[in-house]
Image: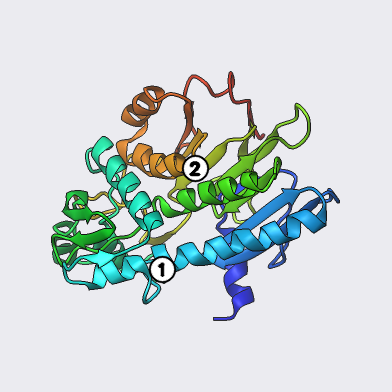
């Protein structure tokens, strides 16, 4: 498949749009603000765009540094790239594999969210994700037997970490960091940029947006959340944020329809089937993008009632739940701490 065709497809599937940017065909997102510099690439089968404000002599080398980080993390975290640290763990048949401190860190974060969510968030979902193959999106529905076999391999407690080594207690288990890796990478990019003096910018990792600082003095960034199933990126609502992460998980990001029924990529680890709870999306606003990434999936799987109560119990985290009938439910800080505007 040609790169331009892939890029166009990914752009149409983007969930979050920064209001001051435009997406035009397969070109790089751009801003009319001459003070900003942007760079775009494809990692983890996702369009990544980083925009920094400041002099080009300072921002251009840092943009290249961000994409060097993206490349390094893909070679560690991808479960589809041969030779990556996660692929080596998956292929080791239960033997311990030495990995980097970054991989240990993100695995421990993922295990923690597995525990907090009572298994609703689980990075050992790899076999189950492969059974559906939403990457190729062939429209194939796995048999009940295949799903049951895959479900039996899902259990974050099967991950054993000792020092800098990782092994899977069940050789059939397969890791998939798709629910947390982009958030972790965004946080690492932000840390790198702030260390080098960047005070204003946007990290957009295909549905995970992390804003550094504010757009102008006392002017927040405006982040638009895509209207479900909109092919042109039309926003359903906007949020105004300063130095915060905005992450959305939705049924319209990767899906297919068969005989009028929608099958999406957010899977119930107990049944192996797509989660059915009348939600279309969950957007999480938080300081840490790793948290936002894991929580958006967790809250979606919990459903609106349980998910809303869970997010309300967490400090400095807000959420917006969108139902399949268009109803919107928000945590108490949305509209108060985080300005919210419904796009008519």
In the picture of the structure, the residue carrying the numbered disc 2 is 289
Examine the rendered structure and indicate whether residue 304 appears above or below residue 188. above
In the picture of the structure, the residue carrying the numbered disc 1 is 137
Q: Nearer the viewer, mark 1 or mark 2?
A: 2
How far across and down, in percent of the image, does residue 45 sit?
Answer: 49, 66
Viewed as shown, does residue 248 lie left or right of 146?
right
Tally the marks.
2
Looking at the image, tell me whether mark 1 or mark 2 is earlier in sequence order. Answer: 1
Circle 1 packing at 10 Å, graded few (<14), some (14-19), many (20+), is: few
Examine the rendered structure and indicate whether residue 55 appears above or below residue 310. below
Instruction: Name the image quarter holding the N terminus.
Output: bottom right
**Callout 2 secondary element:** helix
How far across and down, in percent of the image, does residue 34 sit?
Answer: 86, 51
Circle 2 packing at 10 Å, graded few (<14), some (14-19), many (20+), is: many
Q: Nearer the viewer, residue 304 or 311?
A: 311
Viewed as shown, does residue 152 lie left or right of 242?
left
């Amino acid at each position: 498949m040609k790169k331009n065709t892939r890029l166009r497809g990914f752009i149409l599937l983007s969930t979050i749009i920064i209001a001051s940017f435009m997406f035009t065909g397969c070109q790089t997102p751009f801003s009319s603000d001459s003070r900003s510099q942007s760079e775009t690439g494809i990692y983890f089968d996702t369009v990544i765009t980083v925009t920094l404000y400041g002099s080009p002599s300072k921002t251009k080398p840092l943009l290249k540094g961000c994409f060097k980080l993206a490349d390094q993390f893909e070679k560690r975290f991808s479960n589809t790239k041969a030779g990556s640290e996660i692929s080596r763990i998956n292929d080791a048949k239960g033997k311990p594999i030495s990995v980097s401190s970054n991989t240990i860190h993100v695995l421990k974060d993922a295990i923690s969210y597995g525990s907090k969510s009572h298994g609703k968030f689980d990075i050992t979902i790899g076999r189950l994700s492969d059974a559906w193959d939403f990457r190729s999106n062939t429209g194939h529905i796995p048999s009940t037997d295949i799903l049951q076999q895959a479900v039996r391999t899902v259990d974050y407690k099967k991950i054993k970490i000792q020092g800098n080594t990782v092994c899977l207690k069940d050789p059939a288990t397969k890791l998939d960091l798709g629910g947390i890796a982009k958030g972790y990478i965004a946080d690492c990019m932000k840390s790198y940029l702030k260390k080098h003096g960047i005070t204003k910018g946007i990290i957009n990792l295909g549905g995970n947006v992390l804003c550094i600082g504010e757009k102008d003095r006392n002017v927040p960034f405006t982040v638009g959340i895509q209207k479900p199933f909109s092919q042109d990126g039309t926003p359903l609502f906007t949020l105004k944020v300063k130095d915060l992460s905005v992450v959305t998980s939705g049924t319209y990001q990767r899906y297919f329809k068969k005989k009028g029924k929608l099958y999406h990529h957010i899977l119930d680890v107990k049944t192996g089937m797509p989660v059915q709870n009348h939600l279309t999306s969950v957007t999480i606003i938080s300081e840490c993008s790793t948290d936002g990434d894991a929580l958006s999936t967790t809250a979606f799987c919990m459903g609106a009632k349980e998910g809303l109560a869970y997010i309300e119990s967490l400090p400095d985290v807000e959420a917006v739940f969108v139902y399949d009938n268009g109803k919107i439910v928000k945590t108490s800080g949305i509209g108060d701490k985080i300005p919210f505007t419904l796009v008519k």
